[in-house]
Image: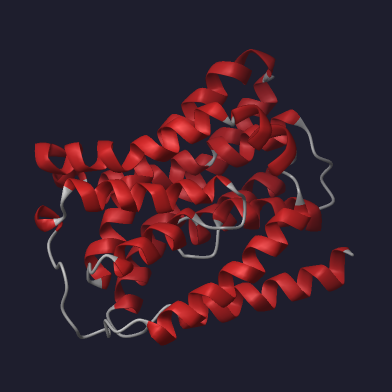
Amino acid sequence: MTILHSLIFGLVEGITEFLPISSTGHLILTANLLKLSSSEFLKSFEIIIQLGAILAVVVLYWKSFLNISNLKKLFVAFLPTAIIGLALYKIIKHYFLGNSSIVLWSLFLGGFFLIIFELLHKNSIANGGVSDMSKISYKQSFIIGLFQSIAVIPGVSRSAATIVGGLFLGLDRITIVEFSFLLAVPTKLAASGLDLFKNAGTMSSSDIGSLVLGFVVSFVVAMASIRLLLTFVRKYTFIPFGVYRVLVAVAFWLILF
């Protein structure tokens, strides 16, 4: 992997991690566009590089992680993904990651679902709902976690799944988007930590250098991406992201197949 590859991956990760369009899916498709052959390191890179974007959440929302109630709810929401991710780690790593067909179908179907959900969803942008994280119940946290666990399938999008789950439960847009930001921290830390534990010994010094560069770029870009998404959801629905997902899926089908 070259320096340019690491820069591109860092940029893609930073932009897409918190948008409902699947960062993992975009990293897999980016690897295809760059004609990088699938390897254990590339799969690990696509998982571990997400830590850069996660650090952006910690920097911007560090006060939220000092709230014990928030931490308890995040733990409850994290449990479903932790259990499923650990149980299916080998299947996800060897059969899902790097599979462009799974990514494209997930993007395509998920895009249509997002559009339809927004058209049917009664909670308008200006309308209320649960408007404070302190008012999210443990039951709601667990259900949001169940939605998130669907995103072990590349292309589904962790943020899309949690946001749809939160809106379905009656949370307002800003609240569920911010909860999704926070929930990304334990989820991605666990996934990256597990992968590092299993594969760190196989990485060379150049591999580690590529990871560090991608990490830094994704962190810087994610800082801006988070702010832009919060500005966007105050004025618009997620329909444009649904349309984007469908168009990207169709475009890559034409390019790759």
Q: How many marks?
A: 0
Viewer can see residue 220? yes
Q: Quadrant of the N terminus?
A: top right
Q: Relative to residue 167, is residue 88 depicted above or below?
A: above
Query: Can you give x and y, in whole percent of width and height, for residue 256 in the image?
Result: 86, 63
- One can see residue 18 in this view: no
17 versus 90 height, above or below: below
Residue 155 pos. (x, y %): 61, 57
Answer with the quarter of the image where residue 245 lies.
bottom right
Q: Nearer the viewer, residue 240 or 2?
A: 240
Query: 139 and 77: which one is in front?
Result: 139
Which residue is more in the foreground, 51 or 107?
Answer: 107
Point 25% across, 49% down: residue: 141
Which residue appears at 28% of the width and 43% of the height?
A: 58
The extreme right residue here reads 257
Location of residue 198 (image quadrant)? top right
Quadrant the C terminus occupies: bottom right
Q: Is residue 194 left or right of residue 27?
A: left
Residue 25, x across and y down, in percent: 63, 55
- In the visual, does 1 lie left or right of 135? right
